Structures are given as C-alpha cells and as structure tokens.
Amino acid sequence: MMLGPPRRRDALKNVRDERKAFLARSAVAVLMLVLGLGLLIARLVNLQISQHGYFSTRADENRMRVVPVAPVRGLIYDRNGVVLAQNQPAFVLEITPEQVPDMAQTLQRLAAIIDIGATDLERFRDRVAKTPRYRGVPLRSNLSMEEVARYEIRRHEFPGVEVTAGLSRNYPLGASAAHIVGYVGGITEQELQQVDAAAYRGINQIGKIGVEKSREELLRGEPGAKIIEANAFGRPLRELDYRRGYPGRNLILSLDARVQLVAERALGPLTGAVVAIDPTSGEVIALVSKPGFDPHFFVEGISRTDYQALLDDPQRPLYNRALQGTYPPGSTVKPAMALAGLEYGVTDPSHREFCGGQMSLPGSSRKYRCWKRSGHGWVDMALGVMRSCDIYFYQLAMNLGIDRIHAAMTGFGLGAPTGLDVPLEKGGLFPSREWKQRVRRESWYPGETLNVGIGQGYTLTTPVQLAQMTARIAMRGGGFKPHVLRAIEDPITRERTTIEPEPLPRIELKDNRNWATVIAAMEDVTHSPSGTAQRIGKDAPYRIAAKTGTAQVASLRQDETRAPTLAETPVHLRDHALFIAFAPVEAPRIAIAVIAEHAGGGSAVAAPIARMVMDQYLLGEVLFDGEPTIVPPPPERPATRSAAP
C-alpha cells in the first residue's frame, strides 16, 4: 500500500521538537519565577523580621528628632547680692537660609511688619556667611510682644523664618563694670574648635572677656535634650521626652557695686582707672576702667561699623586700663624705695639730704630736677616721703644701685602680672641690667638708676600692681593674691563654696620697725599740714596712709628753669595723676590705686577720687560737691532661682 505525499505542515516544521522546546522553556520560566518569588519572600522576611528593629528605628528617626536644650547661664552677683549679669526673657527672629527660597524678598517683606534696621541686616549677613546654611541665624533680638503678634498672624507667608523664645544676657551696671564682668557673644568657628563641642550643644554664646570668659566652664552649665515628633516638613508636632540639663553655677564676686559706681562717678570726664583691694584677703572691691562700653551691643552681635567705631575711638573704650594700662608709677614707688633703703642699710630714718631743686651726677652736667624747683632744703626720710622730694630719692637710688632696687621692687609685685583671675592682664616692666642688655643691647647707666628711683625711666606698672603694692605695705609685708571670685553657688541647692584667699610670700625685713617708720611717713602725707595730700586727710574720720604721684609724659628741656603750667601744656603731653592709699591705718580694710590720664598732679586730681571711694566703702556715704551723698544701690538680687526650664 502506497502512502500519499507528506502534508505541507509537517514538511515546514518539526512539531514534536517545538513542543519539547516549549515545555523546556516553560519549565525554565516557572523555575525562575519560583526562584524570584523565593528571593522576594526571603527579602521580605529579612526586612520584616530580621531587620525590623533597624528599619523601625530609621523610620522613627525620620519622624522623631533629638533637639538639644541650652542650659540657663549662671548669674553673677556682687558681694552684697546686687546683680551684675542676669538672664532676661527675649524673643528672637531667626532665619534658616536653607529653607528660604528668596532671601532678599523675605527680608523685604519682614521689614514691613518688624522694625529691621541697617545694623541688623549688616550683622545678619555677617552671621550667614559664617554659619552653616541648615542652622538658624538671628536677624533681630528682643522683639516686642506687638512685633511677635504681627509676625504670628502672617507666619505662613515666611518659610524658614521663626520666632523663638529664649533668654538674653543682661548687664544692669552696663559700662560701669563691663571690663571686669565682661560679656557673652556668638561662638565663632575657631572657638568651637577649642572647646568640647558636646558641651555646647544648643548653646550659641560664649564668654568673651572678663569673668564671663575666665569662668566660662562654671557659668555655662550642662545642656539637656528633648525628643520631638515632627511632620514631613520638619515642623514639630509634639514633645515625646525631655531630659533636664543643669544650669550654670552662680558666681558671687568680691566687687562692691556701689563702690564701683562711686569710683566711676568720681573720675568724671577723665580717662583712667581705679583699683581697690581688701588687703586682708586680696578681694578686689572695685576695678574701674574709664571710659567703658555698653556690653549689650556685643550680646546681640555688634555690627562691623559699630565695632570699628569703638576701635577708632581715640579714648579706647575697649582697653582695660586697670589691667592692661602700663604707666610710669612716678612718686607712688617712694614708700617701697624707702623700705628698700632701710632694708639694705644704705640710709636710716634720721639721715638727711639737701634739696636745692636740682642735682647732677659726678662728672656730668645733666641736671636732675625736683618737682619743686626752689627745693625743699634739708629733708630726712619722713619729710622726703611726705613732701615727695625727688632729690632725696635720687640720692637713695644712687646709693642702692639698680640691682638692689630691682630686687626690692619686684618683691612688691611690680613689673609682673599679679595673677588676677581675669584674662588679659599685662605685666608691665621693672627694668634691670639684664633686661636692658637683652632687649636693647646696651649697658646700664647711673642716670637711669636715678630715674627708676622716682618711678620714671623705663619703669611701667599697671594700676592693679600699684594696688597690690599698697596692700602689701598695709599688711606689713603680708598679703594675698588679688582675686574677684568670692564664692560659687549651686543654683538648685543654693549651696555655696567660698574661695579661700591665696597668701603671697611674705616680705621679710631685718627690722620690722621699718614698716611703721614708712607707714608713719605715708600717714603724714594726708594728715600733716605740709603733706602733699593734706586736703583729703584733714577732715577724714579715719586715718589714711598714702602717697601722691605725678608721672611725666613728656620730658623737660635741660635749659628750662620752670615746669610749664597745666594750661600751657597740650592735653596729650600733660602728666598722669596718680595716688595710692590704704585705710584705716591701724586696721587696714581698703587699699587703693588711682590713675587719671593727662590730668596733672596726683594730689589735686587723683587723691580726691580715692577719698570718695574710701568714704563709700568705709562709711557708706560719699561727698559730692561738698555734700554727703548716699549713692543708691543698683537693682537688688531677684528672688527667683536660676534653674533649668
């Protein structure tokens, strides 16, 4: 039987092979699908079960944020509880540059509802340039309630802009205590690198000068934290947790606010410094540098224009004359010189020198004049101190020599920092042979010894050094390191830690009766009819030991027969007026140094200033314009605690 011709379909393809191929491909697809499904299930198991905790935390981090809470900065008080630095509630307008689409337009629209001046804008732009864009930058501080209300009504129109409530540093005495109390300001990048960044979480200010800087670690406190829930736009919805920090410690200073104010008022329009110390403890009662400056400008962030104006001010208000001002001490060193002469045995209280108004060294024609051109005649040590005879102390200096003078004067603390617990103190200079050879590459000359003997020449001291020298004389060689911190107070428990005075090495004399000899001569300065400062001592209800001083700013020509009067001398060439004193003599409670720049004689200008300060501290009242005046106290200490919110 014959088969017919094959069908056309069988001739074109192999159906059996195609079916096998289809089944194989289907099996591979199913296998891949099963494998993919298995991998997907395994991944879901891994995500939902194995890594549930990790991704749950990540989700919470997107929803919850840890926000640092700045601690309340510690308060600063004077010895009587008067507030020197405090915190006041304040509203601050902040802008986060990263969240603002058009900064120029935003600033323009904000200015329509809030008073924003050119200084605010300049300060803001400076801060923006120095701050990461994701951090808020203050535009205006201390907004009024009306300004806050106007902003809140239109808050939705200003993305990236927020009004925050916080505390602002305030200084009730203002410029009167700015140099000693200091101020706080914004933390710079350089400062942030020098401190523990964790300790400054949420803190945007740091102490810049004065006690605010030197005691920053105590005043700062410990930051807290709070956990907040936020929406997708980052706006806080609710607070989930709060971890309390700890407020900064309160500081009690040794300053007396009333004495500080009296000292400033007594200086009047003069530039200068007043330093008063309790000789029995080293506590600084007053430390005035005038002119001062308003610290509040720096708290809010001073503009470049205003800061440059302070720098360019010829009176240099930022310059702390009490700690950084170096001046020739003039005749204020004569009591210490007299003690040195007695100690080294080159003179005795009865030894006399003739003062004819001028003298010359052997073999030299140069004239060394006394401040009294007609001379004092024959003077012994007591008269030499009381009348401030330059010729007597020229001779004494020549007999002592520079080496013994340097040893004695540096023993009183001249020419070196006192170690006061406030930054930026200068050391001044008390010259020596070694110093001149090292610095100037020159030998020491006898005429220079004479100048040093009356506090002139290369000699430079600070007012705080002169106050310390005076305190050491008052304590008959004893004394304590000057300091302004009196106690530290815990703001929560109110427990106080008192700062113990640090004794200085005692100045030992071969004959302790020499102290009484020199102090009696200093007492004659104010209580003898011939004393250079008898006008402030004749009606004093307590005994004052003192020494006047006049420091030359410009030298006189050798051919001048008389010193020009104050009116004949340009202001910048007039002598500095100095005065040192302690009282009461029998039981010293205050030692003071006063310098009035370019004011003339110490007896006429500086001595009355010291008397006013001593009256205020010892009597509680002071004479102004011949009338007793009780100076009103600054604002009293608030009853509320400085605690964390």
Image: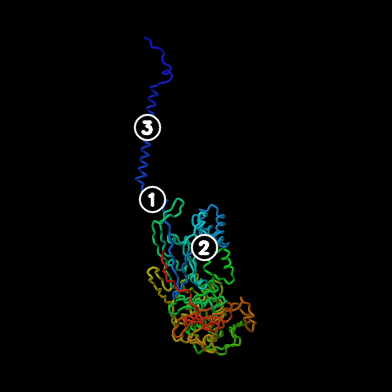
Q: Secondary structure at mark 2?
A: helix
- Residue position for label 1: 57
Separation of residues labelled 1 and 2 (CA atoms): 42 Å
The answer to whether one can see residue 400 in this image is no
Mark 1 surroundings within 10 Å by alpha-carbon count, few (fewer than 14), some (14 through 19), many (20 or more): few
Q: Given the image, on which type of amino acid does mark 1 rest?
A: Thr
The foreground one among 220 and 598 is: 220
- Residue position for label 2: 146
The foreground one among 121 and 256 is: 121
- Residue 602: percent from left, percent from top: 56, 81
Q: Given the image, on which type of amino acid does mark 2 rest?
A: Glu
- Whether the residues at callouts 1 and 2 have beta carbons within 8 Å, the answer is no
Q: Secondary structure at mark 3?
A: helix
- Residue 211: percent from left, percent from top: 47, 70
- Above or below: residue 582 compared with residue 97: below
- Residue 271: percent from left, percent from top: 56, 75
- Residue position for label 3: 30
Dividing the picture into quarters, in which one does residue 560 lie?
Answer: bottom right
- Residue 585: percent from left, percent from top: 46, 85
Classify the position of the C terminus by image quarter.
bottom left
The answer to whether one can see residue 326 in this image is yes
Q: Secondary structure at mark 1?
A: helix
- Above or below: residue 510 compared with residue 24: below
The foreground one among 461 and 407 is: 461
Q: Given the image, on which type of amino acid does mark 3 rest?
A: Val
Separation of residues labelled 2 and 3 (CA atoms): 73 Å
